[in-house]
Amino acid sequence: MRDAKTFYEVFREQGISRRSFNKFCSLTAASLGLGPAFAPRIAHAMETKPRTPVIWMNGLECTCCSESFIRSGHPLASDVVLSMLSLDYSHVLMAAAGHQAEAALEETRRDHAGKYILAVEGNPPLNEDGMFCIVGGRPFIEQLQEMAEGAAAVVAWGSCASNGCVQAARPNPTQATPIHKVIKGKPIIKVPGCPPIAEVMTGVLTYMLTFDRIPPLDRLGRPEMFYGQRIHDKCYRRPHFDAGQFAEAWDDEGSRKGYCLYKMGCRGPTTYNACSTVRWNDGVSFPIQSGHGCIGCSEENFWDNGPFYDRLATVHTPLGVESNADRIGTAAAGVIGTAIAAHAAASALSRARKKPGEYATSDQ
Amino acid sequence: MANSEATEKRRGFFANLERHATEEPSPAAKVYVYEAPLRLWHWVNALCLVVLCVTGYLIGKPPPSVGGEASFSYVFGYIRLVHFAAGQILMVAFIYRLAWAFLGNHHAHQLFLTPFWSPKWWGEVFHELRWYFFLEKVPKKYIGHNPLAQFSMFFLFLLPLLNGIVTGGALYAEGAGTDSWWFSAFGWVFSVYGDSFSVHTIHRITMWVITCFAMVHVYVAFREDIMSRQSLVSTMVSGWRYFKDDRE
C-alpha cells in the first residue's frame, strides 16, 4: 500500500503486455463514450500517476456486485482493475482475515487519508443500533462512517448502496438505508443495478482513477454515460413497441416473434441502465434479448413496484387492500356513476313531487 | 357602473374575493360572467382531457397487437403522438388560462383563489352540501361558482390538473432525454415522487381522478341548470348567466 508505483508499472509486473495495455485504454475510452483521442490520455495518466488505493466494503448485501465485477467482460479489464484495487481490504477477495484484516483497513485509513476511494457494496441497517450487520464486532454503520470520513470519494455499488434494494422493501424491518443518507459531505457516485454491469463498474472506477475526478452525474447521482438513457430508448425490440406489436403471453405467437414485452410488465421504459447497449457476459445478451422483461433492478423502489409481470404497479390503499391504479380508478368511477344515477333519480322525484310553479313563487 | 367600480376598489382585494365567492342576493336578470377567451379555454381544455384520457388509457393498456412487419405500422407510435400533442396543447392552454386570471374579469381568478379564511364562505359550502342531500329546499343565487363548486374545482380539478401536467411533463422529458429542456423544466418531479415507475402510477391515478371529476362535473352542470335558480350549461357557451327569478 505504501508504494508509489504507477498503474502501468503494476500492470507490467502482472505480466500484462504493452499491447494489451493499449487495448484496455482504447476500450475504456470507447465504453466511457470519450472518443479515440482520449485513449492516449488514459494511457498517459496510467503511466505517470501513482495508483490510488480503493477500499471495498461490504454491508448488508448478497455479493452479486463483487461477483459481477470480477467477471468484467474483457478479460484484461478484470486483471487490470483488480490490480488497481487495494486487496488489503475486500471481504470477498482479500487473503487476510480477522484482526489482521481490520488492522489493514485501519492502516489504509491512516496512511492514505483523504486520498483513497471508498467503494461500498451493500448498505447499513440502522434499526436496533445497527445490530443487523456486524463487521469485526462492530455495527457496519460505524465502520462505514469512519472510512467515509477519510475518503476522497465514495462509490455506491449496486442497488443496495444506491437505493436500499430488497432488504429495504416494505416494511423494511432492519431499516436498511442507502449510503447517501448516512454519509454527508463526500461526493457519492451511485452505480445502481442488481448487480451493476461489470463493464460499467470497471468503467466508472477507471474514469475516476485516471482523470482524478468523478464522472459527470445525473440528478440522482448516477454516471451519465451509463445511466443517461432508459433501456427502452436503445432496446432492439423498440420498433415492435412503436408498431403496436406486443407479446401477450410467454408462449404466444408474439413472444416467439420477439415482439415488445411491454404488456408483460417489462420495466425497460422506466429503467435507466446500459443493458441494451453494453449487455452482459461480454456483450452476449441481456434479459429482454433472452425473452424476459426487464424488472428494473437499477431503479429505486423496484422491489416494491411489483408485480414484475404487470404494466401497473400494486398500489397499497389505506385500507390495506392491494390493488392497482386501474382497479382503483374503475371502482371509483363505478361508485360515482351509480351515485350520480341515484342522485339524478332522487332529484327528478323531488322535482316531480312539487306542484308546477310552486318553487318559483314560494320563498322558504 | 362607475360608482360600483369605486366601491369595489374601496373594499380591497380579499374582501372582494369573499364577496364574489358567496351569495348574491339580488343580481340583475342576466350577468356577463365568462368572457370569450375563458370559454375558449374551457372547451379546448375539455377536448384535450377527453383525448388525453382515452389515449392515456390505451398507453397503459395497449390494444391487441397488429400483424405484419414492424416497419409497416406505427399504431402505438400514433397513439402516443396524439397523447403528447394533446398534452402539450393542454399545457399551453393552461399557461394562457393563468395569464387570463390576471387579464380577465374577477370571475377569471375564482378557479385559483378560494376564500378559505371566510366563515361565511364555509357556511355556504355546507348550505350547498345540504342542498345536494335534499335538506334545503331553496338554493342560493350565485353569479360565479357556488362555494361547493369552487371547493371541488380547486381540489378535484385544479390540483389534479397541475399534478397531471407536471408528471406528464416529467414522463415526456424522459423520452426527450435527460439533456433536454423538458428535463430541466420537469426533472424535479423525480425528486418529489421518486422513481420513474412511481411517477407513471401517479400519472395514471391522476387520470382516474380527473375522469371522476368530469363525470360529477357534467352531471352537476345539467342538474343545476334544471334545478337551481341560474343557468349553467348555456353560460359556458354564451358567457351570460341568466337568473330564473327575481326574488332575494
Image: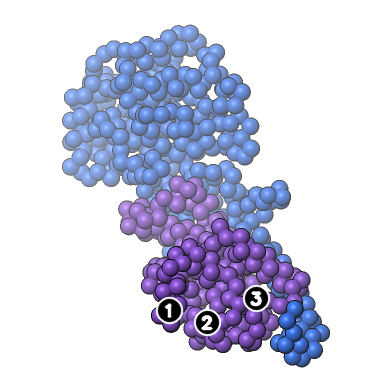
Chain colours: A blue, B purple
Disc 1 on helix, strand or loop?
helix
Question: Which residue is the site of mark 3?
Answer: B140
- The numbered mark, 3 or 2, whose residue comes first in the sequence reads 3
- The numbered mark, 1 or 3, whose residue comes first in the sequence reads 1
Q: What is the three-letter code of the residue carrying label 3?
A: Lys
Q: What is the three-letter code of the residue carrying label 1?
A: Asn
CA gap, disc 1 and disc 3: 26 Å
Residue B238 drawn above or below residue A210 = below
Residue at horizontal 64%, vertical 37%?
Answer: A171
Question: Which residue is the site of mark 1?
Answer: B3
What subunit carries mark 1?
B
Question: Which residue is the site of mark 2?
Answer: B236
CA gap, disc 1 and disc 2: 28 Å
Residue at horizontal 68%, vertical 49%?
Answer: A318
Asked whether, in this view, residue B36 is left or right of residue B223, the answer is left
- In-front residue for pair A142/A262: A142
What subunit carries mark 3?
B
Image location of residue B186, percent across then percent down = 40, 55
Residue neighbourhood size for the residue with mark 2, other residues' Cα within 10 Å, grouped as few (<14), some (14–19), many (≥20): some
Q: Residue A188 falls in which quadrant of the image? A: top left
Query: Are the residues flagged by discs 1 and 2 from a single subunit?
Result: yes
